Amino acid sequence: MIEILNPADLLRARDTGALVADILRTLKSRSVVGTNLLEIDRWAQHMIVEAGAQSCYVDYEPSFGRGPFGHYICTSVNDAVLHGLPHDYPLADGDLLSLDLAVSLGGVVADSAISFVVGDTPAPESVALIDATERALAAGIAAAGPGARVGDISYAIGTVLGAAGYPINTEFGGHGVGSTMHQDPHVSNTGRPGRGYRLRPGLLLALEPWIMADTAALVTDDDGWTLRSVTGCRTAHSEHTIAITDDGAEVMTLPK
């Protein structure tokens, strides 16, 4: 299903996006050496409930996961890149942490992810990974607008990631959002320009470039959810929800 939002829904999407961004910003500030991933999950739960919003994750049970996710945020550390299931792990200095959060507020979903290094000794490799995903995300947003096609976004993202020398996995990527978290169209992190669905005002898309340092192959952790690089290399993930407007693309997931 591809859902086109009306102006009232887009106003609600701005509120949802700002909430997601504010929660992620708060969680980043609290994620220091010694912080437990389960603490991060509890903080996320508290802020979601306090805002009168609903988690998109806690009851989520897709075909690629094992049972309901059961937590409020994805916490992926180092070689984990997607769907990181919070567990009893205290963060160490230099850990590369990705936080991925989707909530629904007023019936509209927003989805965003950030990656950052914990502590005061970021490895150059980690900084480069994060930078590449953030630049690719910016390129994808710049390529989006009414009349453009999904392939234009995918091509822009893939061009940045490829130029940085990173392999690109196409199993998971961006997607439409709206009244539910995962909708069509799928937005691959590489593709051909001029191909795919033509973008229309009112469309919400979650764009999410993610990479692994030296492989495109994933392995699923024993928890049935966490996806890791098959080589154990480090990973990064950046994501924004955008709205296609008459003038281009508006980023929904920015702090107020």
Image (spheres, helix red, strand yellow):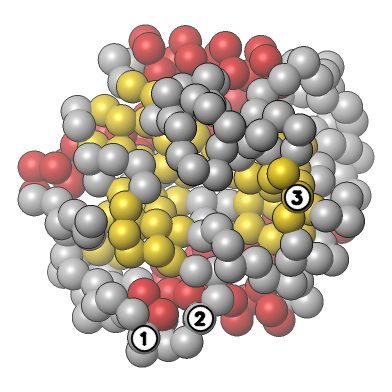
Of the residues tagged 1 and 3, which is closer to the observer? 3
> Relative to 32, is 4 on the left or the right?
left
Of the numbered discs in the image, which one, if any, rests on residue 219?
3
Labels 2 & 1 near each other (Cβ < 8 A):
yes
Frontmost residue, 56 versus 69? 69
What residue would you read off at disc 2? 191
The residue sitting at 66% across, 34% down in the picture is 224
> Relative to 18, is 86 on the left or the right?
right
Residue 234, percent across and down? 83, 51
What residue would you read off at disc 1? 195
Q: Secondary structure at mark 2?
A: loop
Q: Quadrant of the C terminus?
A: top left
Residue 123, percent across and down? 90, 49
The residue sitting at 37% across, 10% down in the picture is 50
Frontmost residue, 204 versus 14? 204
Is residue 75 visible in the rendered image? The answer is: no
Residue 148, percent across and down? 29, 80
Labels 3 & 2 near each other (Cβ < 8 A):
no
